Image (cartoon, rainbow, N blue to C red):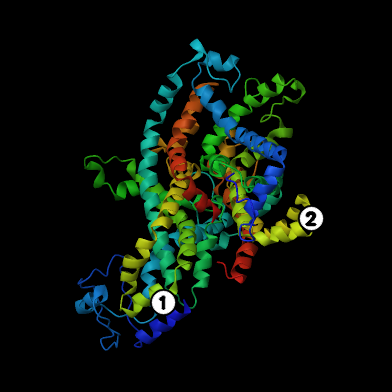
Amino acid sequence: MSSPPAGPTPESNTRRERLARAARNADRTRIALYAVLGALVGFYLAPLEAGLMTAFKTTDAFNRSVPFLPPIAEGFTLEPWRVAFRELWNGLINSLLLAVPATVLSAGLGSIAAYGLTTIDWKYQMPIVALFVAGIFIPYQAVLVPLSRLFAIVDTQSLLSVLWGLPLMEEHYASILNLIVTHVAYGIPITFLLFRAYYQSFSNEMIEAAKLDGASVFSIYRNIVLPLSKPMFAVTLIYQFTQIWNDLLFALVILPSGGGAAAPVTVALNALSGGIVQSFNTQMAGAFVAALPTLIVYVLFGEQFAKGVAS
Amino acid sequence: MQRLTDVLRRLRPGAGGSVRGSGAGGEGEPGQTASGDGSDAGDERLRADGGVAAAEETGGRRSLLSSDFVQSIPFWLPPFLLMGFFVYGAIGWNFVISLTDFSGLVLPEYDVSNFDLDMYRQALNDPTFWTAAQNTLVLLVVFTALCLVFGLLLAILVDQGIRFENTFRTIYLLPMSLSFVVTAKFWAWMYNPEIGMINVTLSQLGLDVLTLQWISNPDTKLAAVIFALIWQFSGYAMVVYLAGLRAIPDDHYEAARVDGASTLKMYWRVILPQLRASTMSAAVVLMVFALKAFDFLYVMFGNNPGPAADILATMMFREAFGSNQWAYGSAIAIVLFAMALAVVAPYLYAEYRRGEL
């Protein structure tokens, strides 16, 4: 704790500094506090740590050693990682093909919708705003049967049959496209809410001035609102990316059973246990492989992620 | 915003323009000829010197649409239609299916004369449904309450002006960034009765009595699931409470201190009541997470977690996609939807009343 000035002035008498003073008076409380915080770190990281250690152990080693201890000597192996990467590679590609466009589209659509219903202010917009916001809270079970019916009726694969002959195109991209559309549609409510809260904080004067200069609603969005939205785009993109990457339910319902060639990494990871009994080392390695992109995003942009979840 | 509206009214007296169809938001390039529909020619628009606006004015033929409402349509309507179709259209469709007898591999028949509530009747007479509904409620209430309590304690600890606050916060929130699939894999391993971390640790501490078959024993199954979910989401409650705590002015702490309140009393009497809004919003979101816990249960137990941990979400999925009882699954989904609505609608209404929507 950086020490506050010795003679406390009224201004410096803030809560945090007061707490700091109290802390110096009660070192023992302080130590206890850090002990508790440290124990909690242990609690939150224990499953990850045990998983990581297990992923480096041979079957024999993880069956006989303590889960959270590192592997020793001949108990060490990289084989689980090799297997996990091999089994999940297609899933990683599919997840990337799915998550990136879906994230960008849902963020963009959320932004323009929020602009149309927030910065442009008109009288009876509240019911529409409410419909957007309520969309965040619906349990997806309530749309699963219709979704499976919808994609049975709308056969994207035949509709786009022209495309599959082209180089770099594969037929299973049709299923990924279905998933993208679905994720975009169900992502719009949350991105809408994030952008709406942000646009509400814009000053009226700025928009007003642009209006007086004769700027159209389109150019106000493009030249003023969109450039100012960058921080919120960061938050939204990061939040949506983790949400879409982590989803299992839609993939289970929309993809042909078993996921087929289009299975995203979550489906592939879930299937990883199938067949091989008790291969916890491979499963743990697979869990880390599947979680890697979101972990990287989280470690790099934890602040934005926290903002996303807090609102 | 009201002022902007007034300004717009003054600027655009000629009401009644036509709607531009395209939703492309990127127009308004200087000098670009926007695809105007050529209405409102006699618009007495204020002109300003220079800048983008002048360039656009000379571009000239853009349609000067009248009201804010009409102008806003290209922005919100396309996303609204997409979202509305998938969310509300699908819920409506789901409700219609729940009125039919759609099952098996045949196509559904939407024949109004055959619509009935049989599927709901079937649910009410199905003991599995009642078990699942009960488990859903227990999960919802216990998970949410414990998460809130735990999150509040975390927030208070982190708010003590500690060093490395960001690091602690990041670690506590980390599990939330993981997929249910990943966390379920981790916890299946943690709970493994022979070689899992929990039982191994317990027996090393000499507490062999406590080593249970956590996720196969019906008595502890749901509790084990709830515990893992709290591990994953208490960081979220912490973040919300932390924002709430930071919003409380310092002098409230000061005043309580001057009055001689103990720390515990201060938090209980002074701070906690001011966190009502945080509690409300965190509780609603946590309940939504609990309703979405399907992925976790599905990865851990497959589509049938057994009566001890079966929730409506897993039951719905099993009936519809496991047994092809589409109509029955839809009916269960509607019940689930009604439960979510009962939680969310009052919250949204309260937010609306407070002007915070």
Q: How many marks?
A: 2
Which residue occupies the foreground of this view, A225 or B181? A225
Which quadrant, please, contains the C terminus of chain B? bottom right
Mark 2 chain: B
For label 1, the residue is: B69
Which residue occupies the foreground of this view, B294 or B330? B294
Label 2's element? loop
**What residue is shown at x 45% (from left), y 66% (from top)?**
A199
For label 2, the residue is: B261
Q: Horizontal and vertical percent for residue B298?
A: 57, 37
**What residue is shown at x 36% (from left), y 69% (from top)?**
B74
Mark 1 chain: B
- The mark lying in front, picked from 1 and 2, is 2
Q: Horizontal and vertical percent for residue A248?
A: 49, 41
Query: Which callout, 1 or 2, points at the residue further toward the start of the chain?
Result: 1
The amino acid at mark 2 is Ala
Which residue occupies the foreground of this view, A105 or A171? A105
Label 1's element? helix
| Crowd class of label 1 (few under 14; some 14 to 19; many from 20; radius 10 Å) | some
- Residue B144 visible, this orientation: no
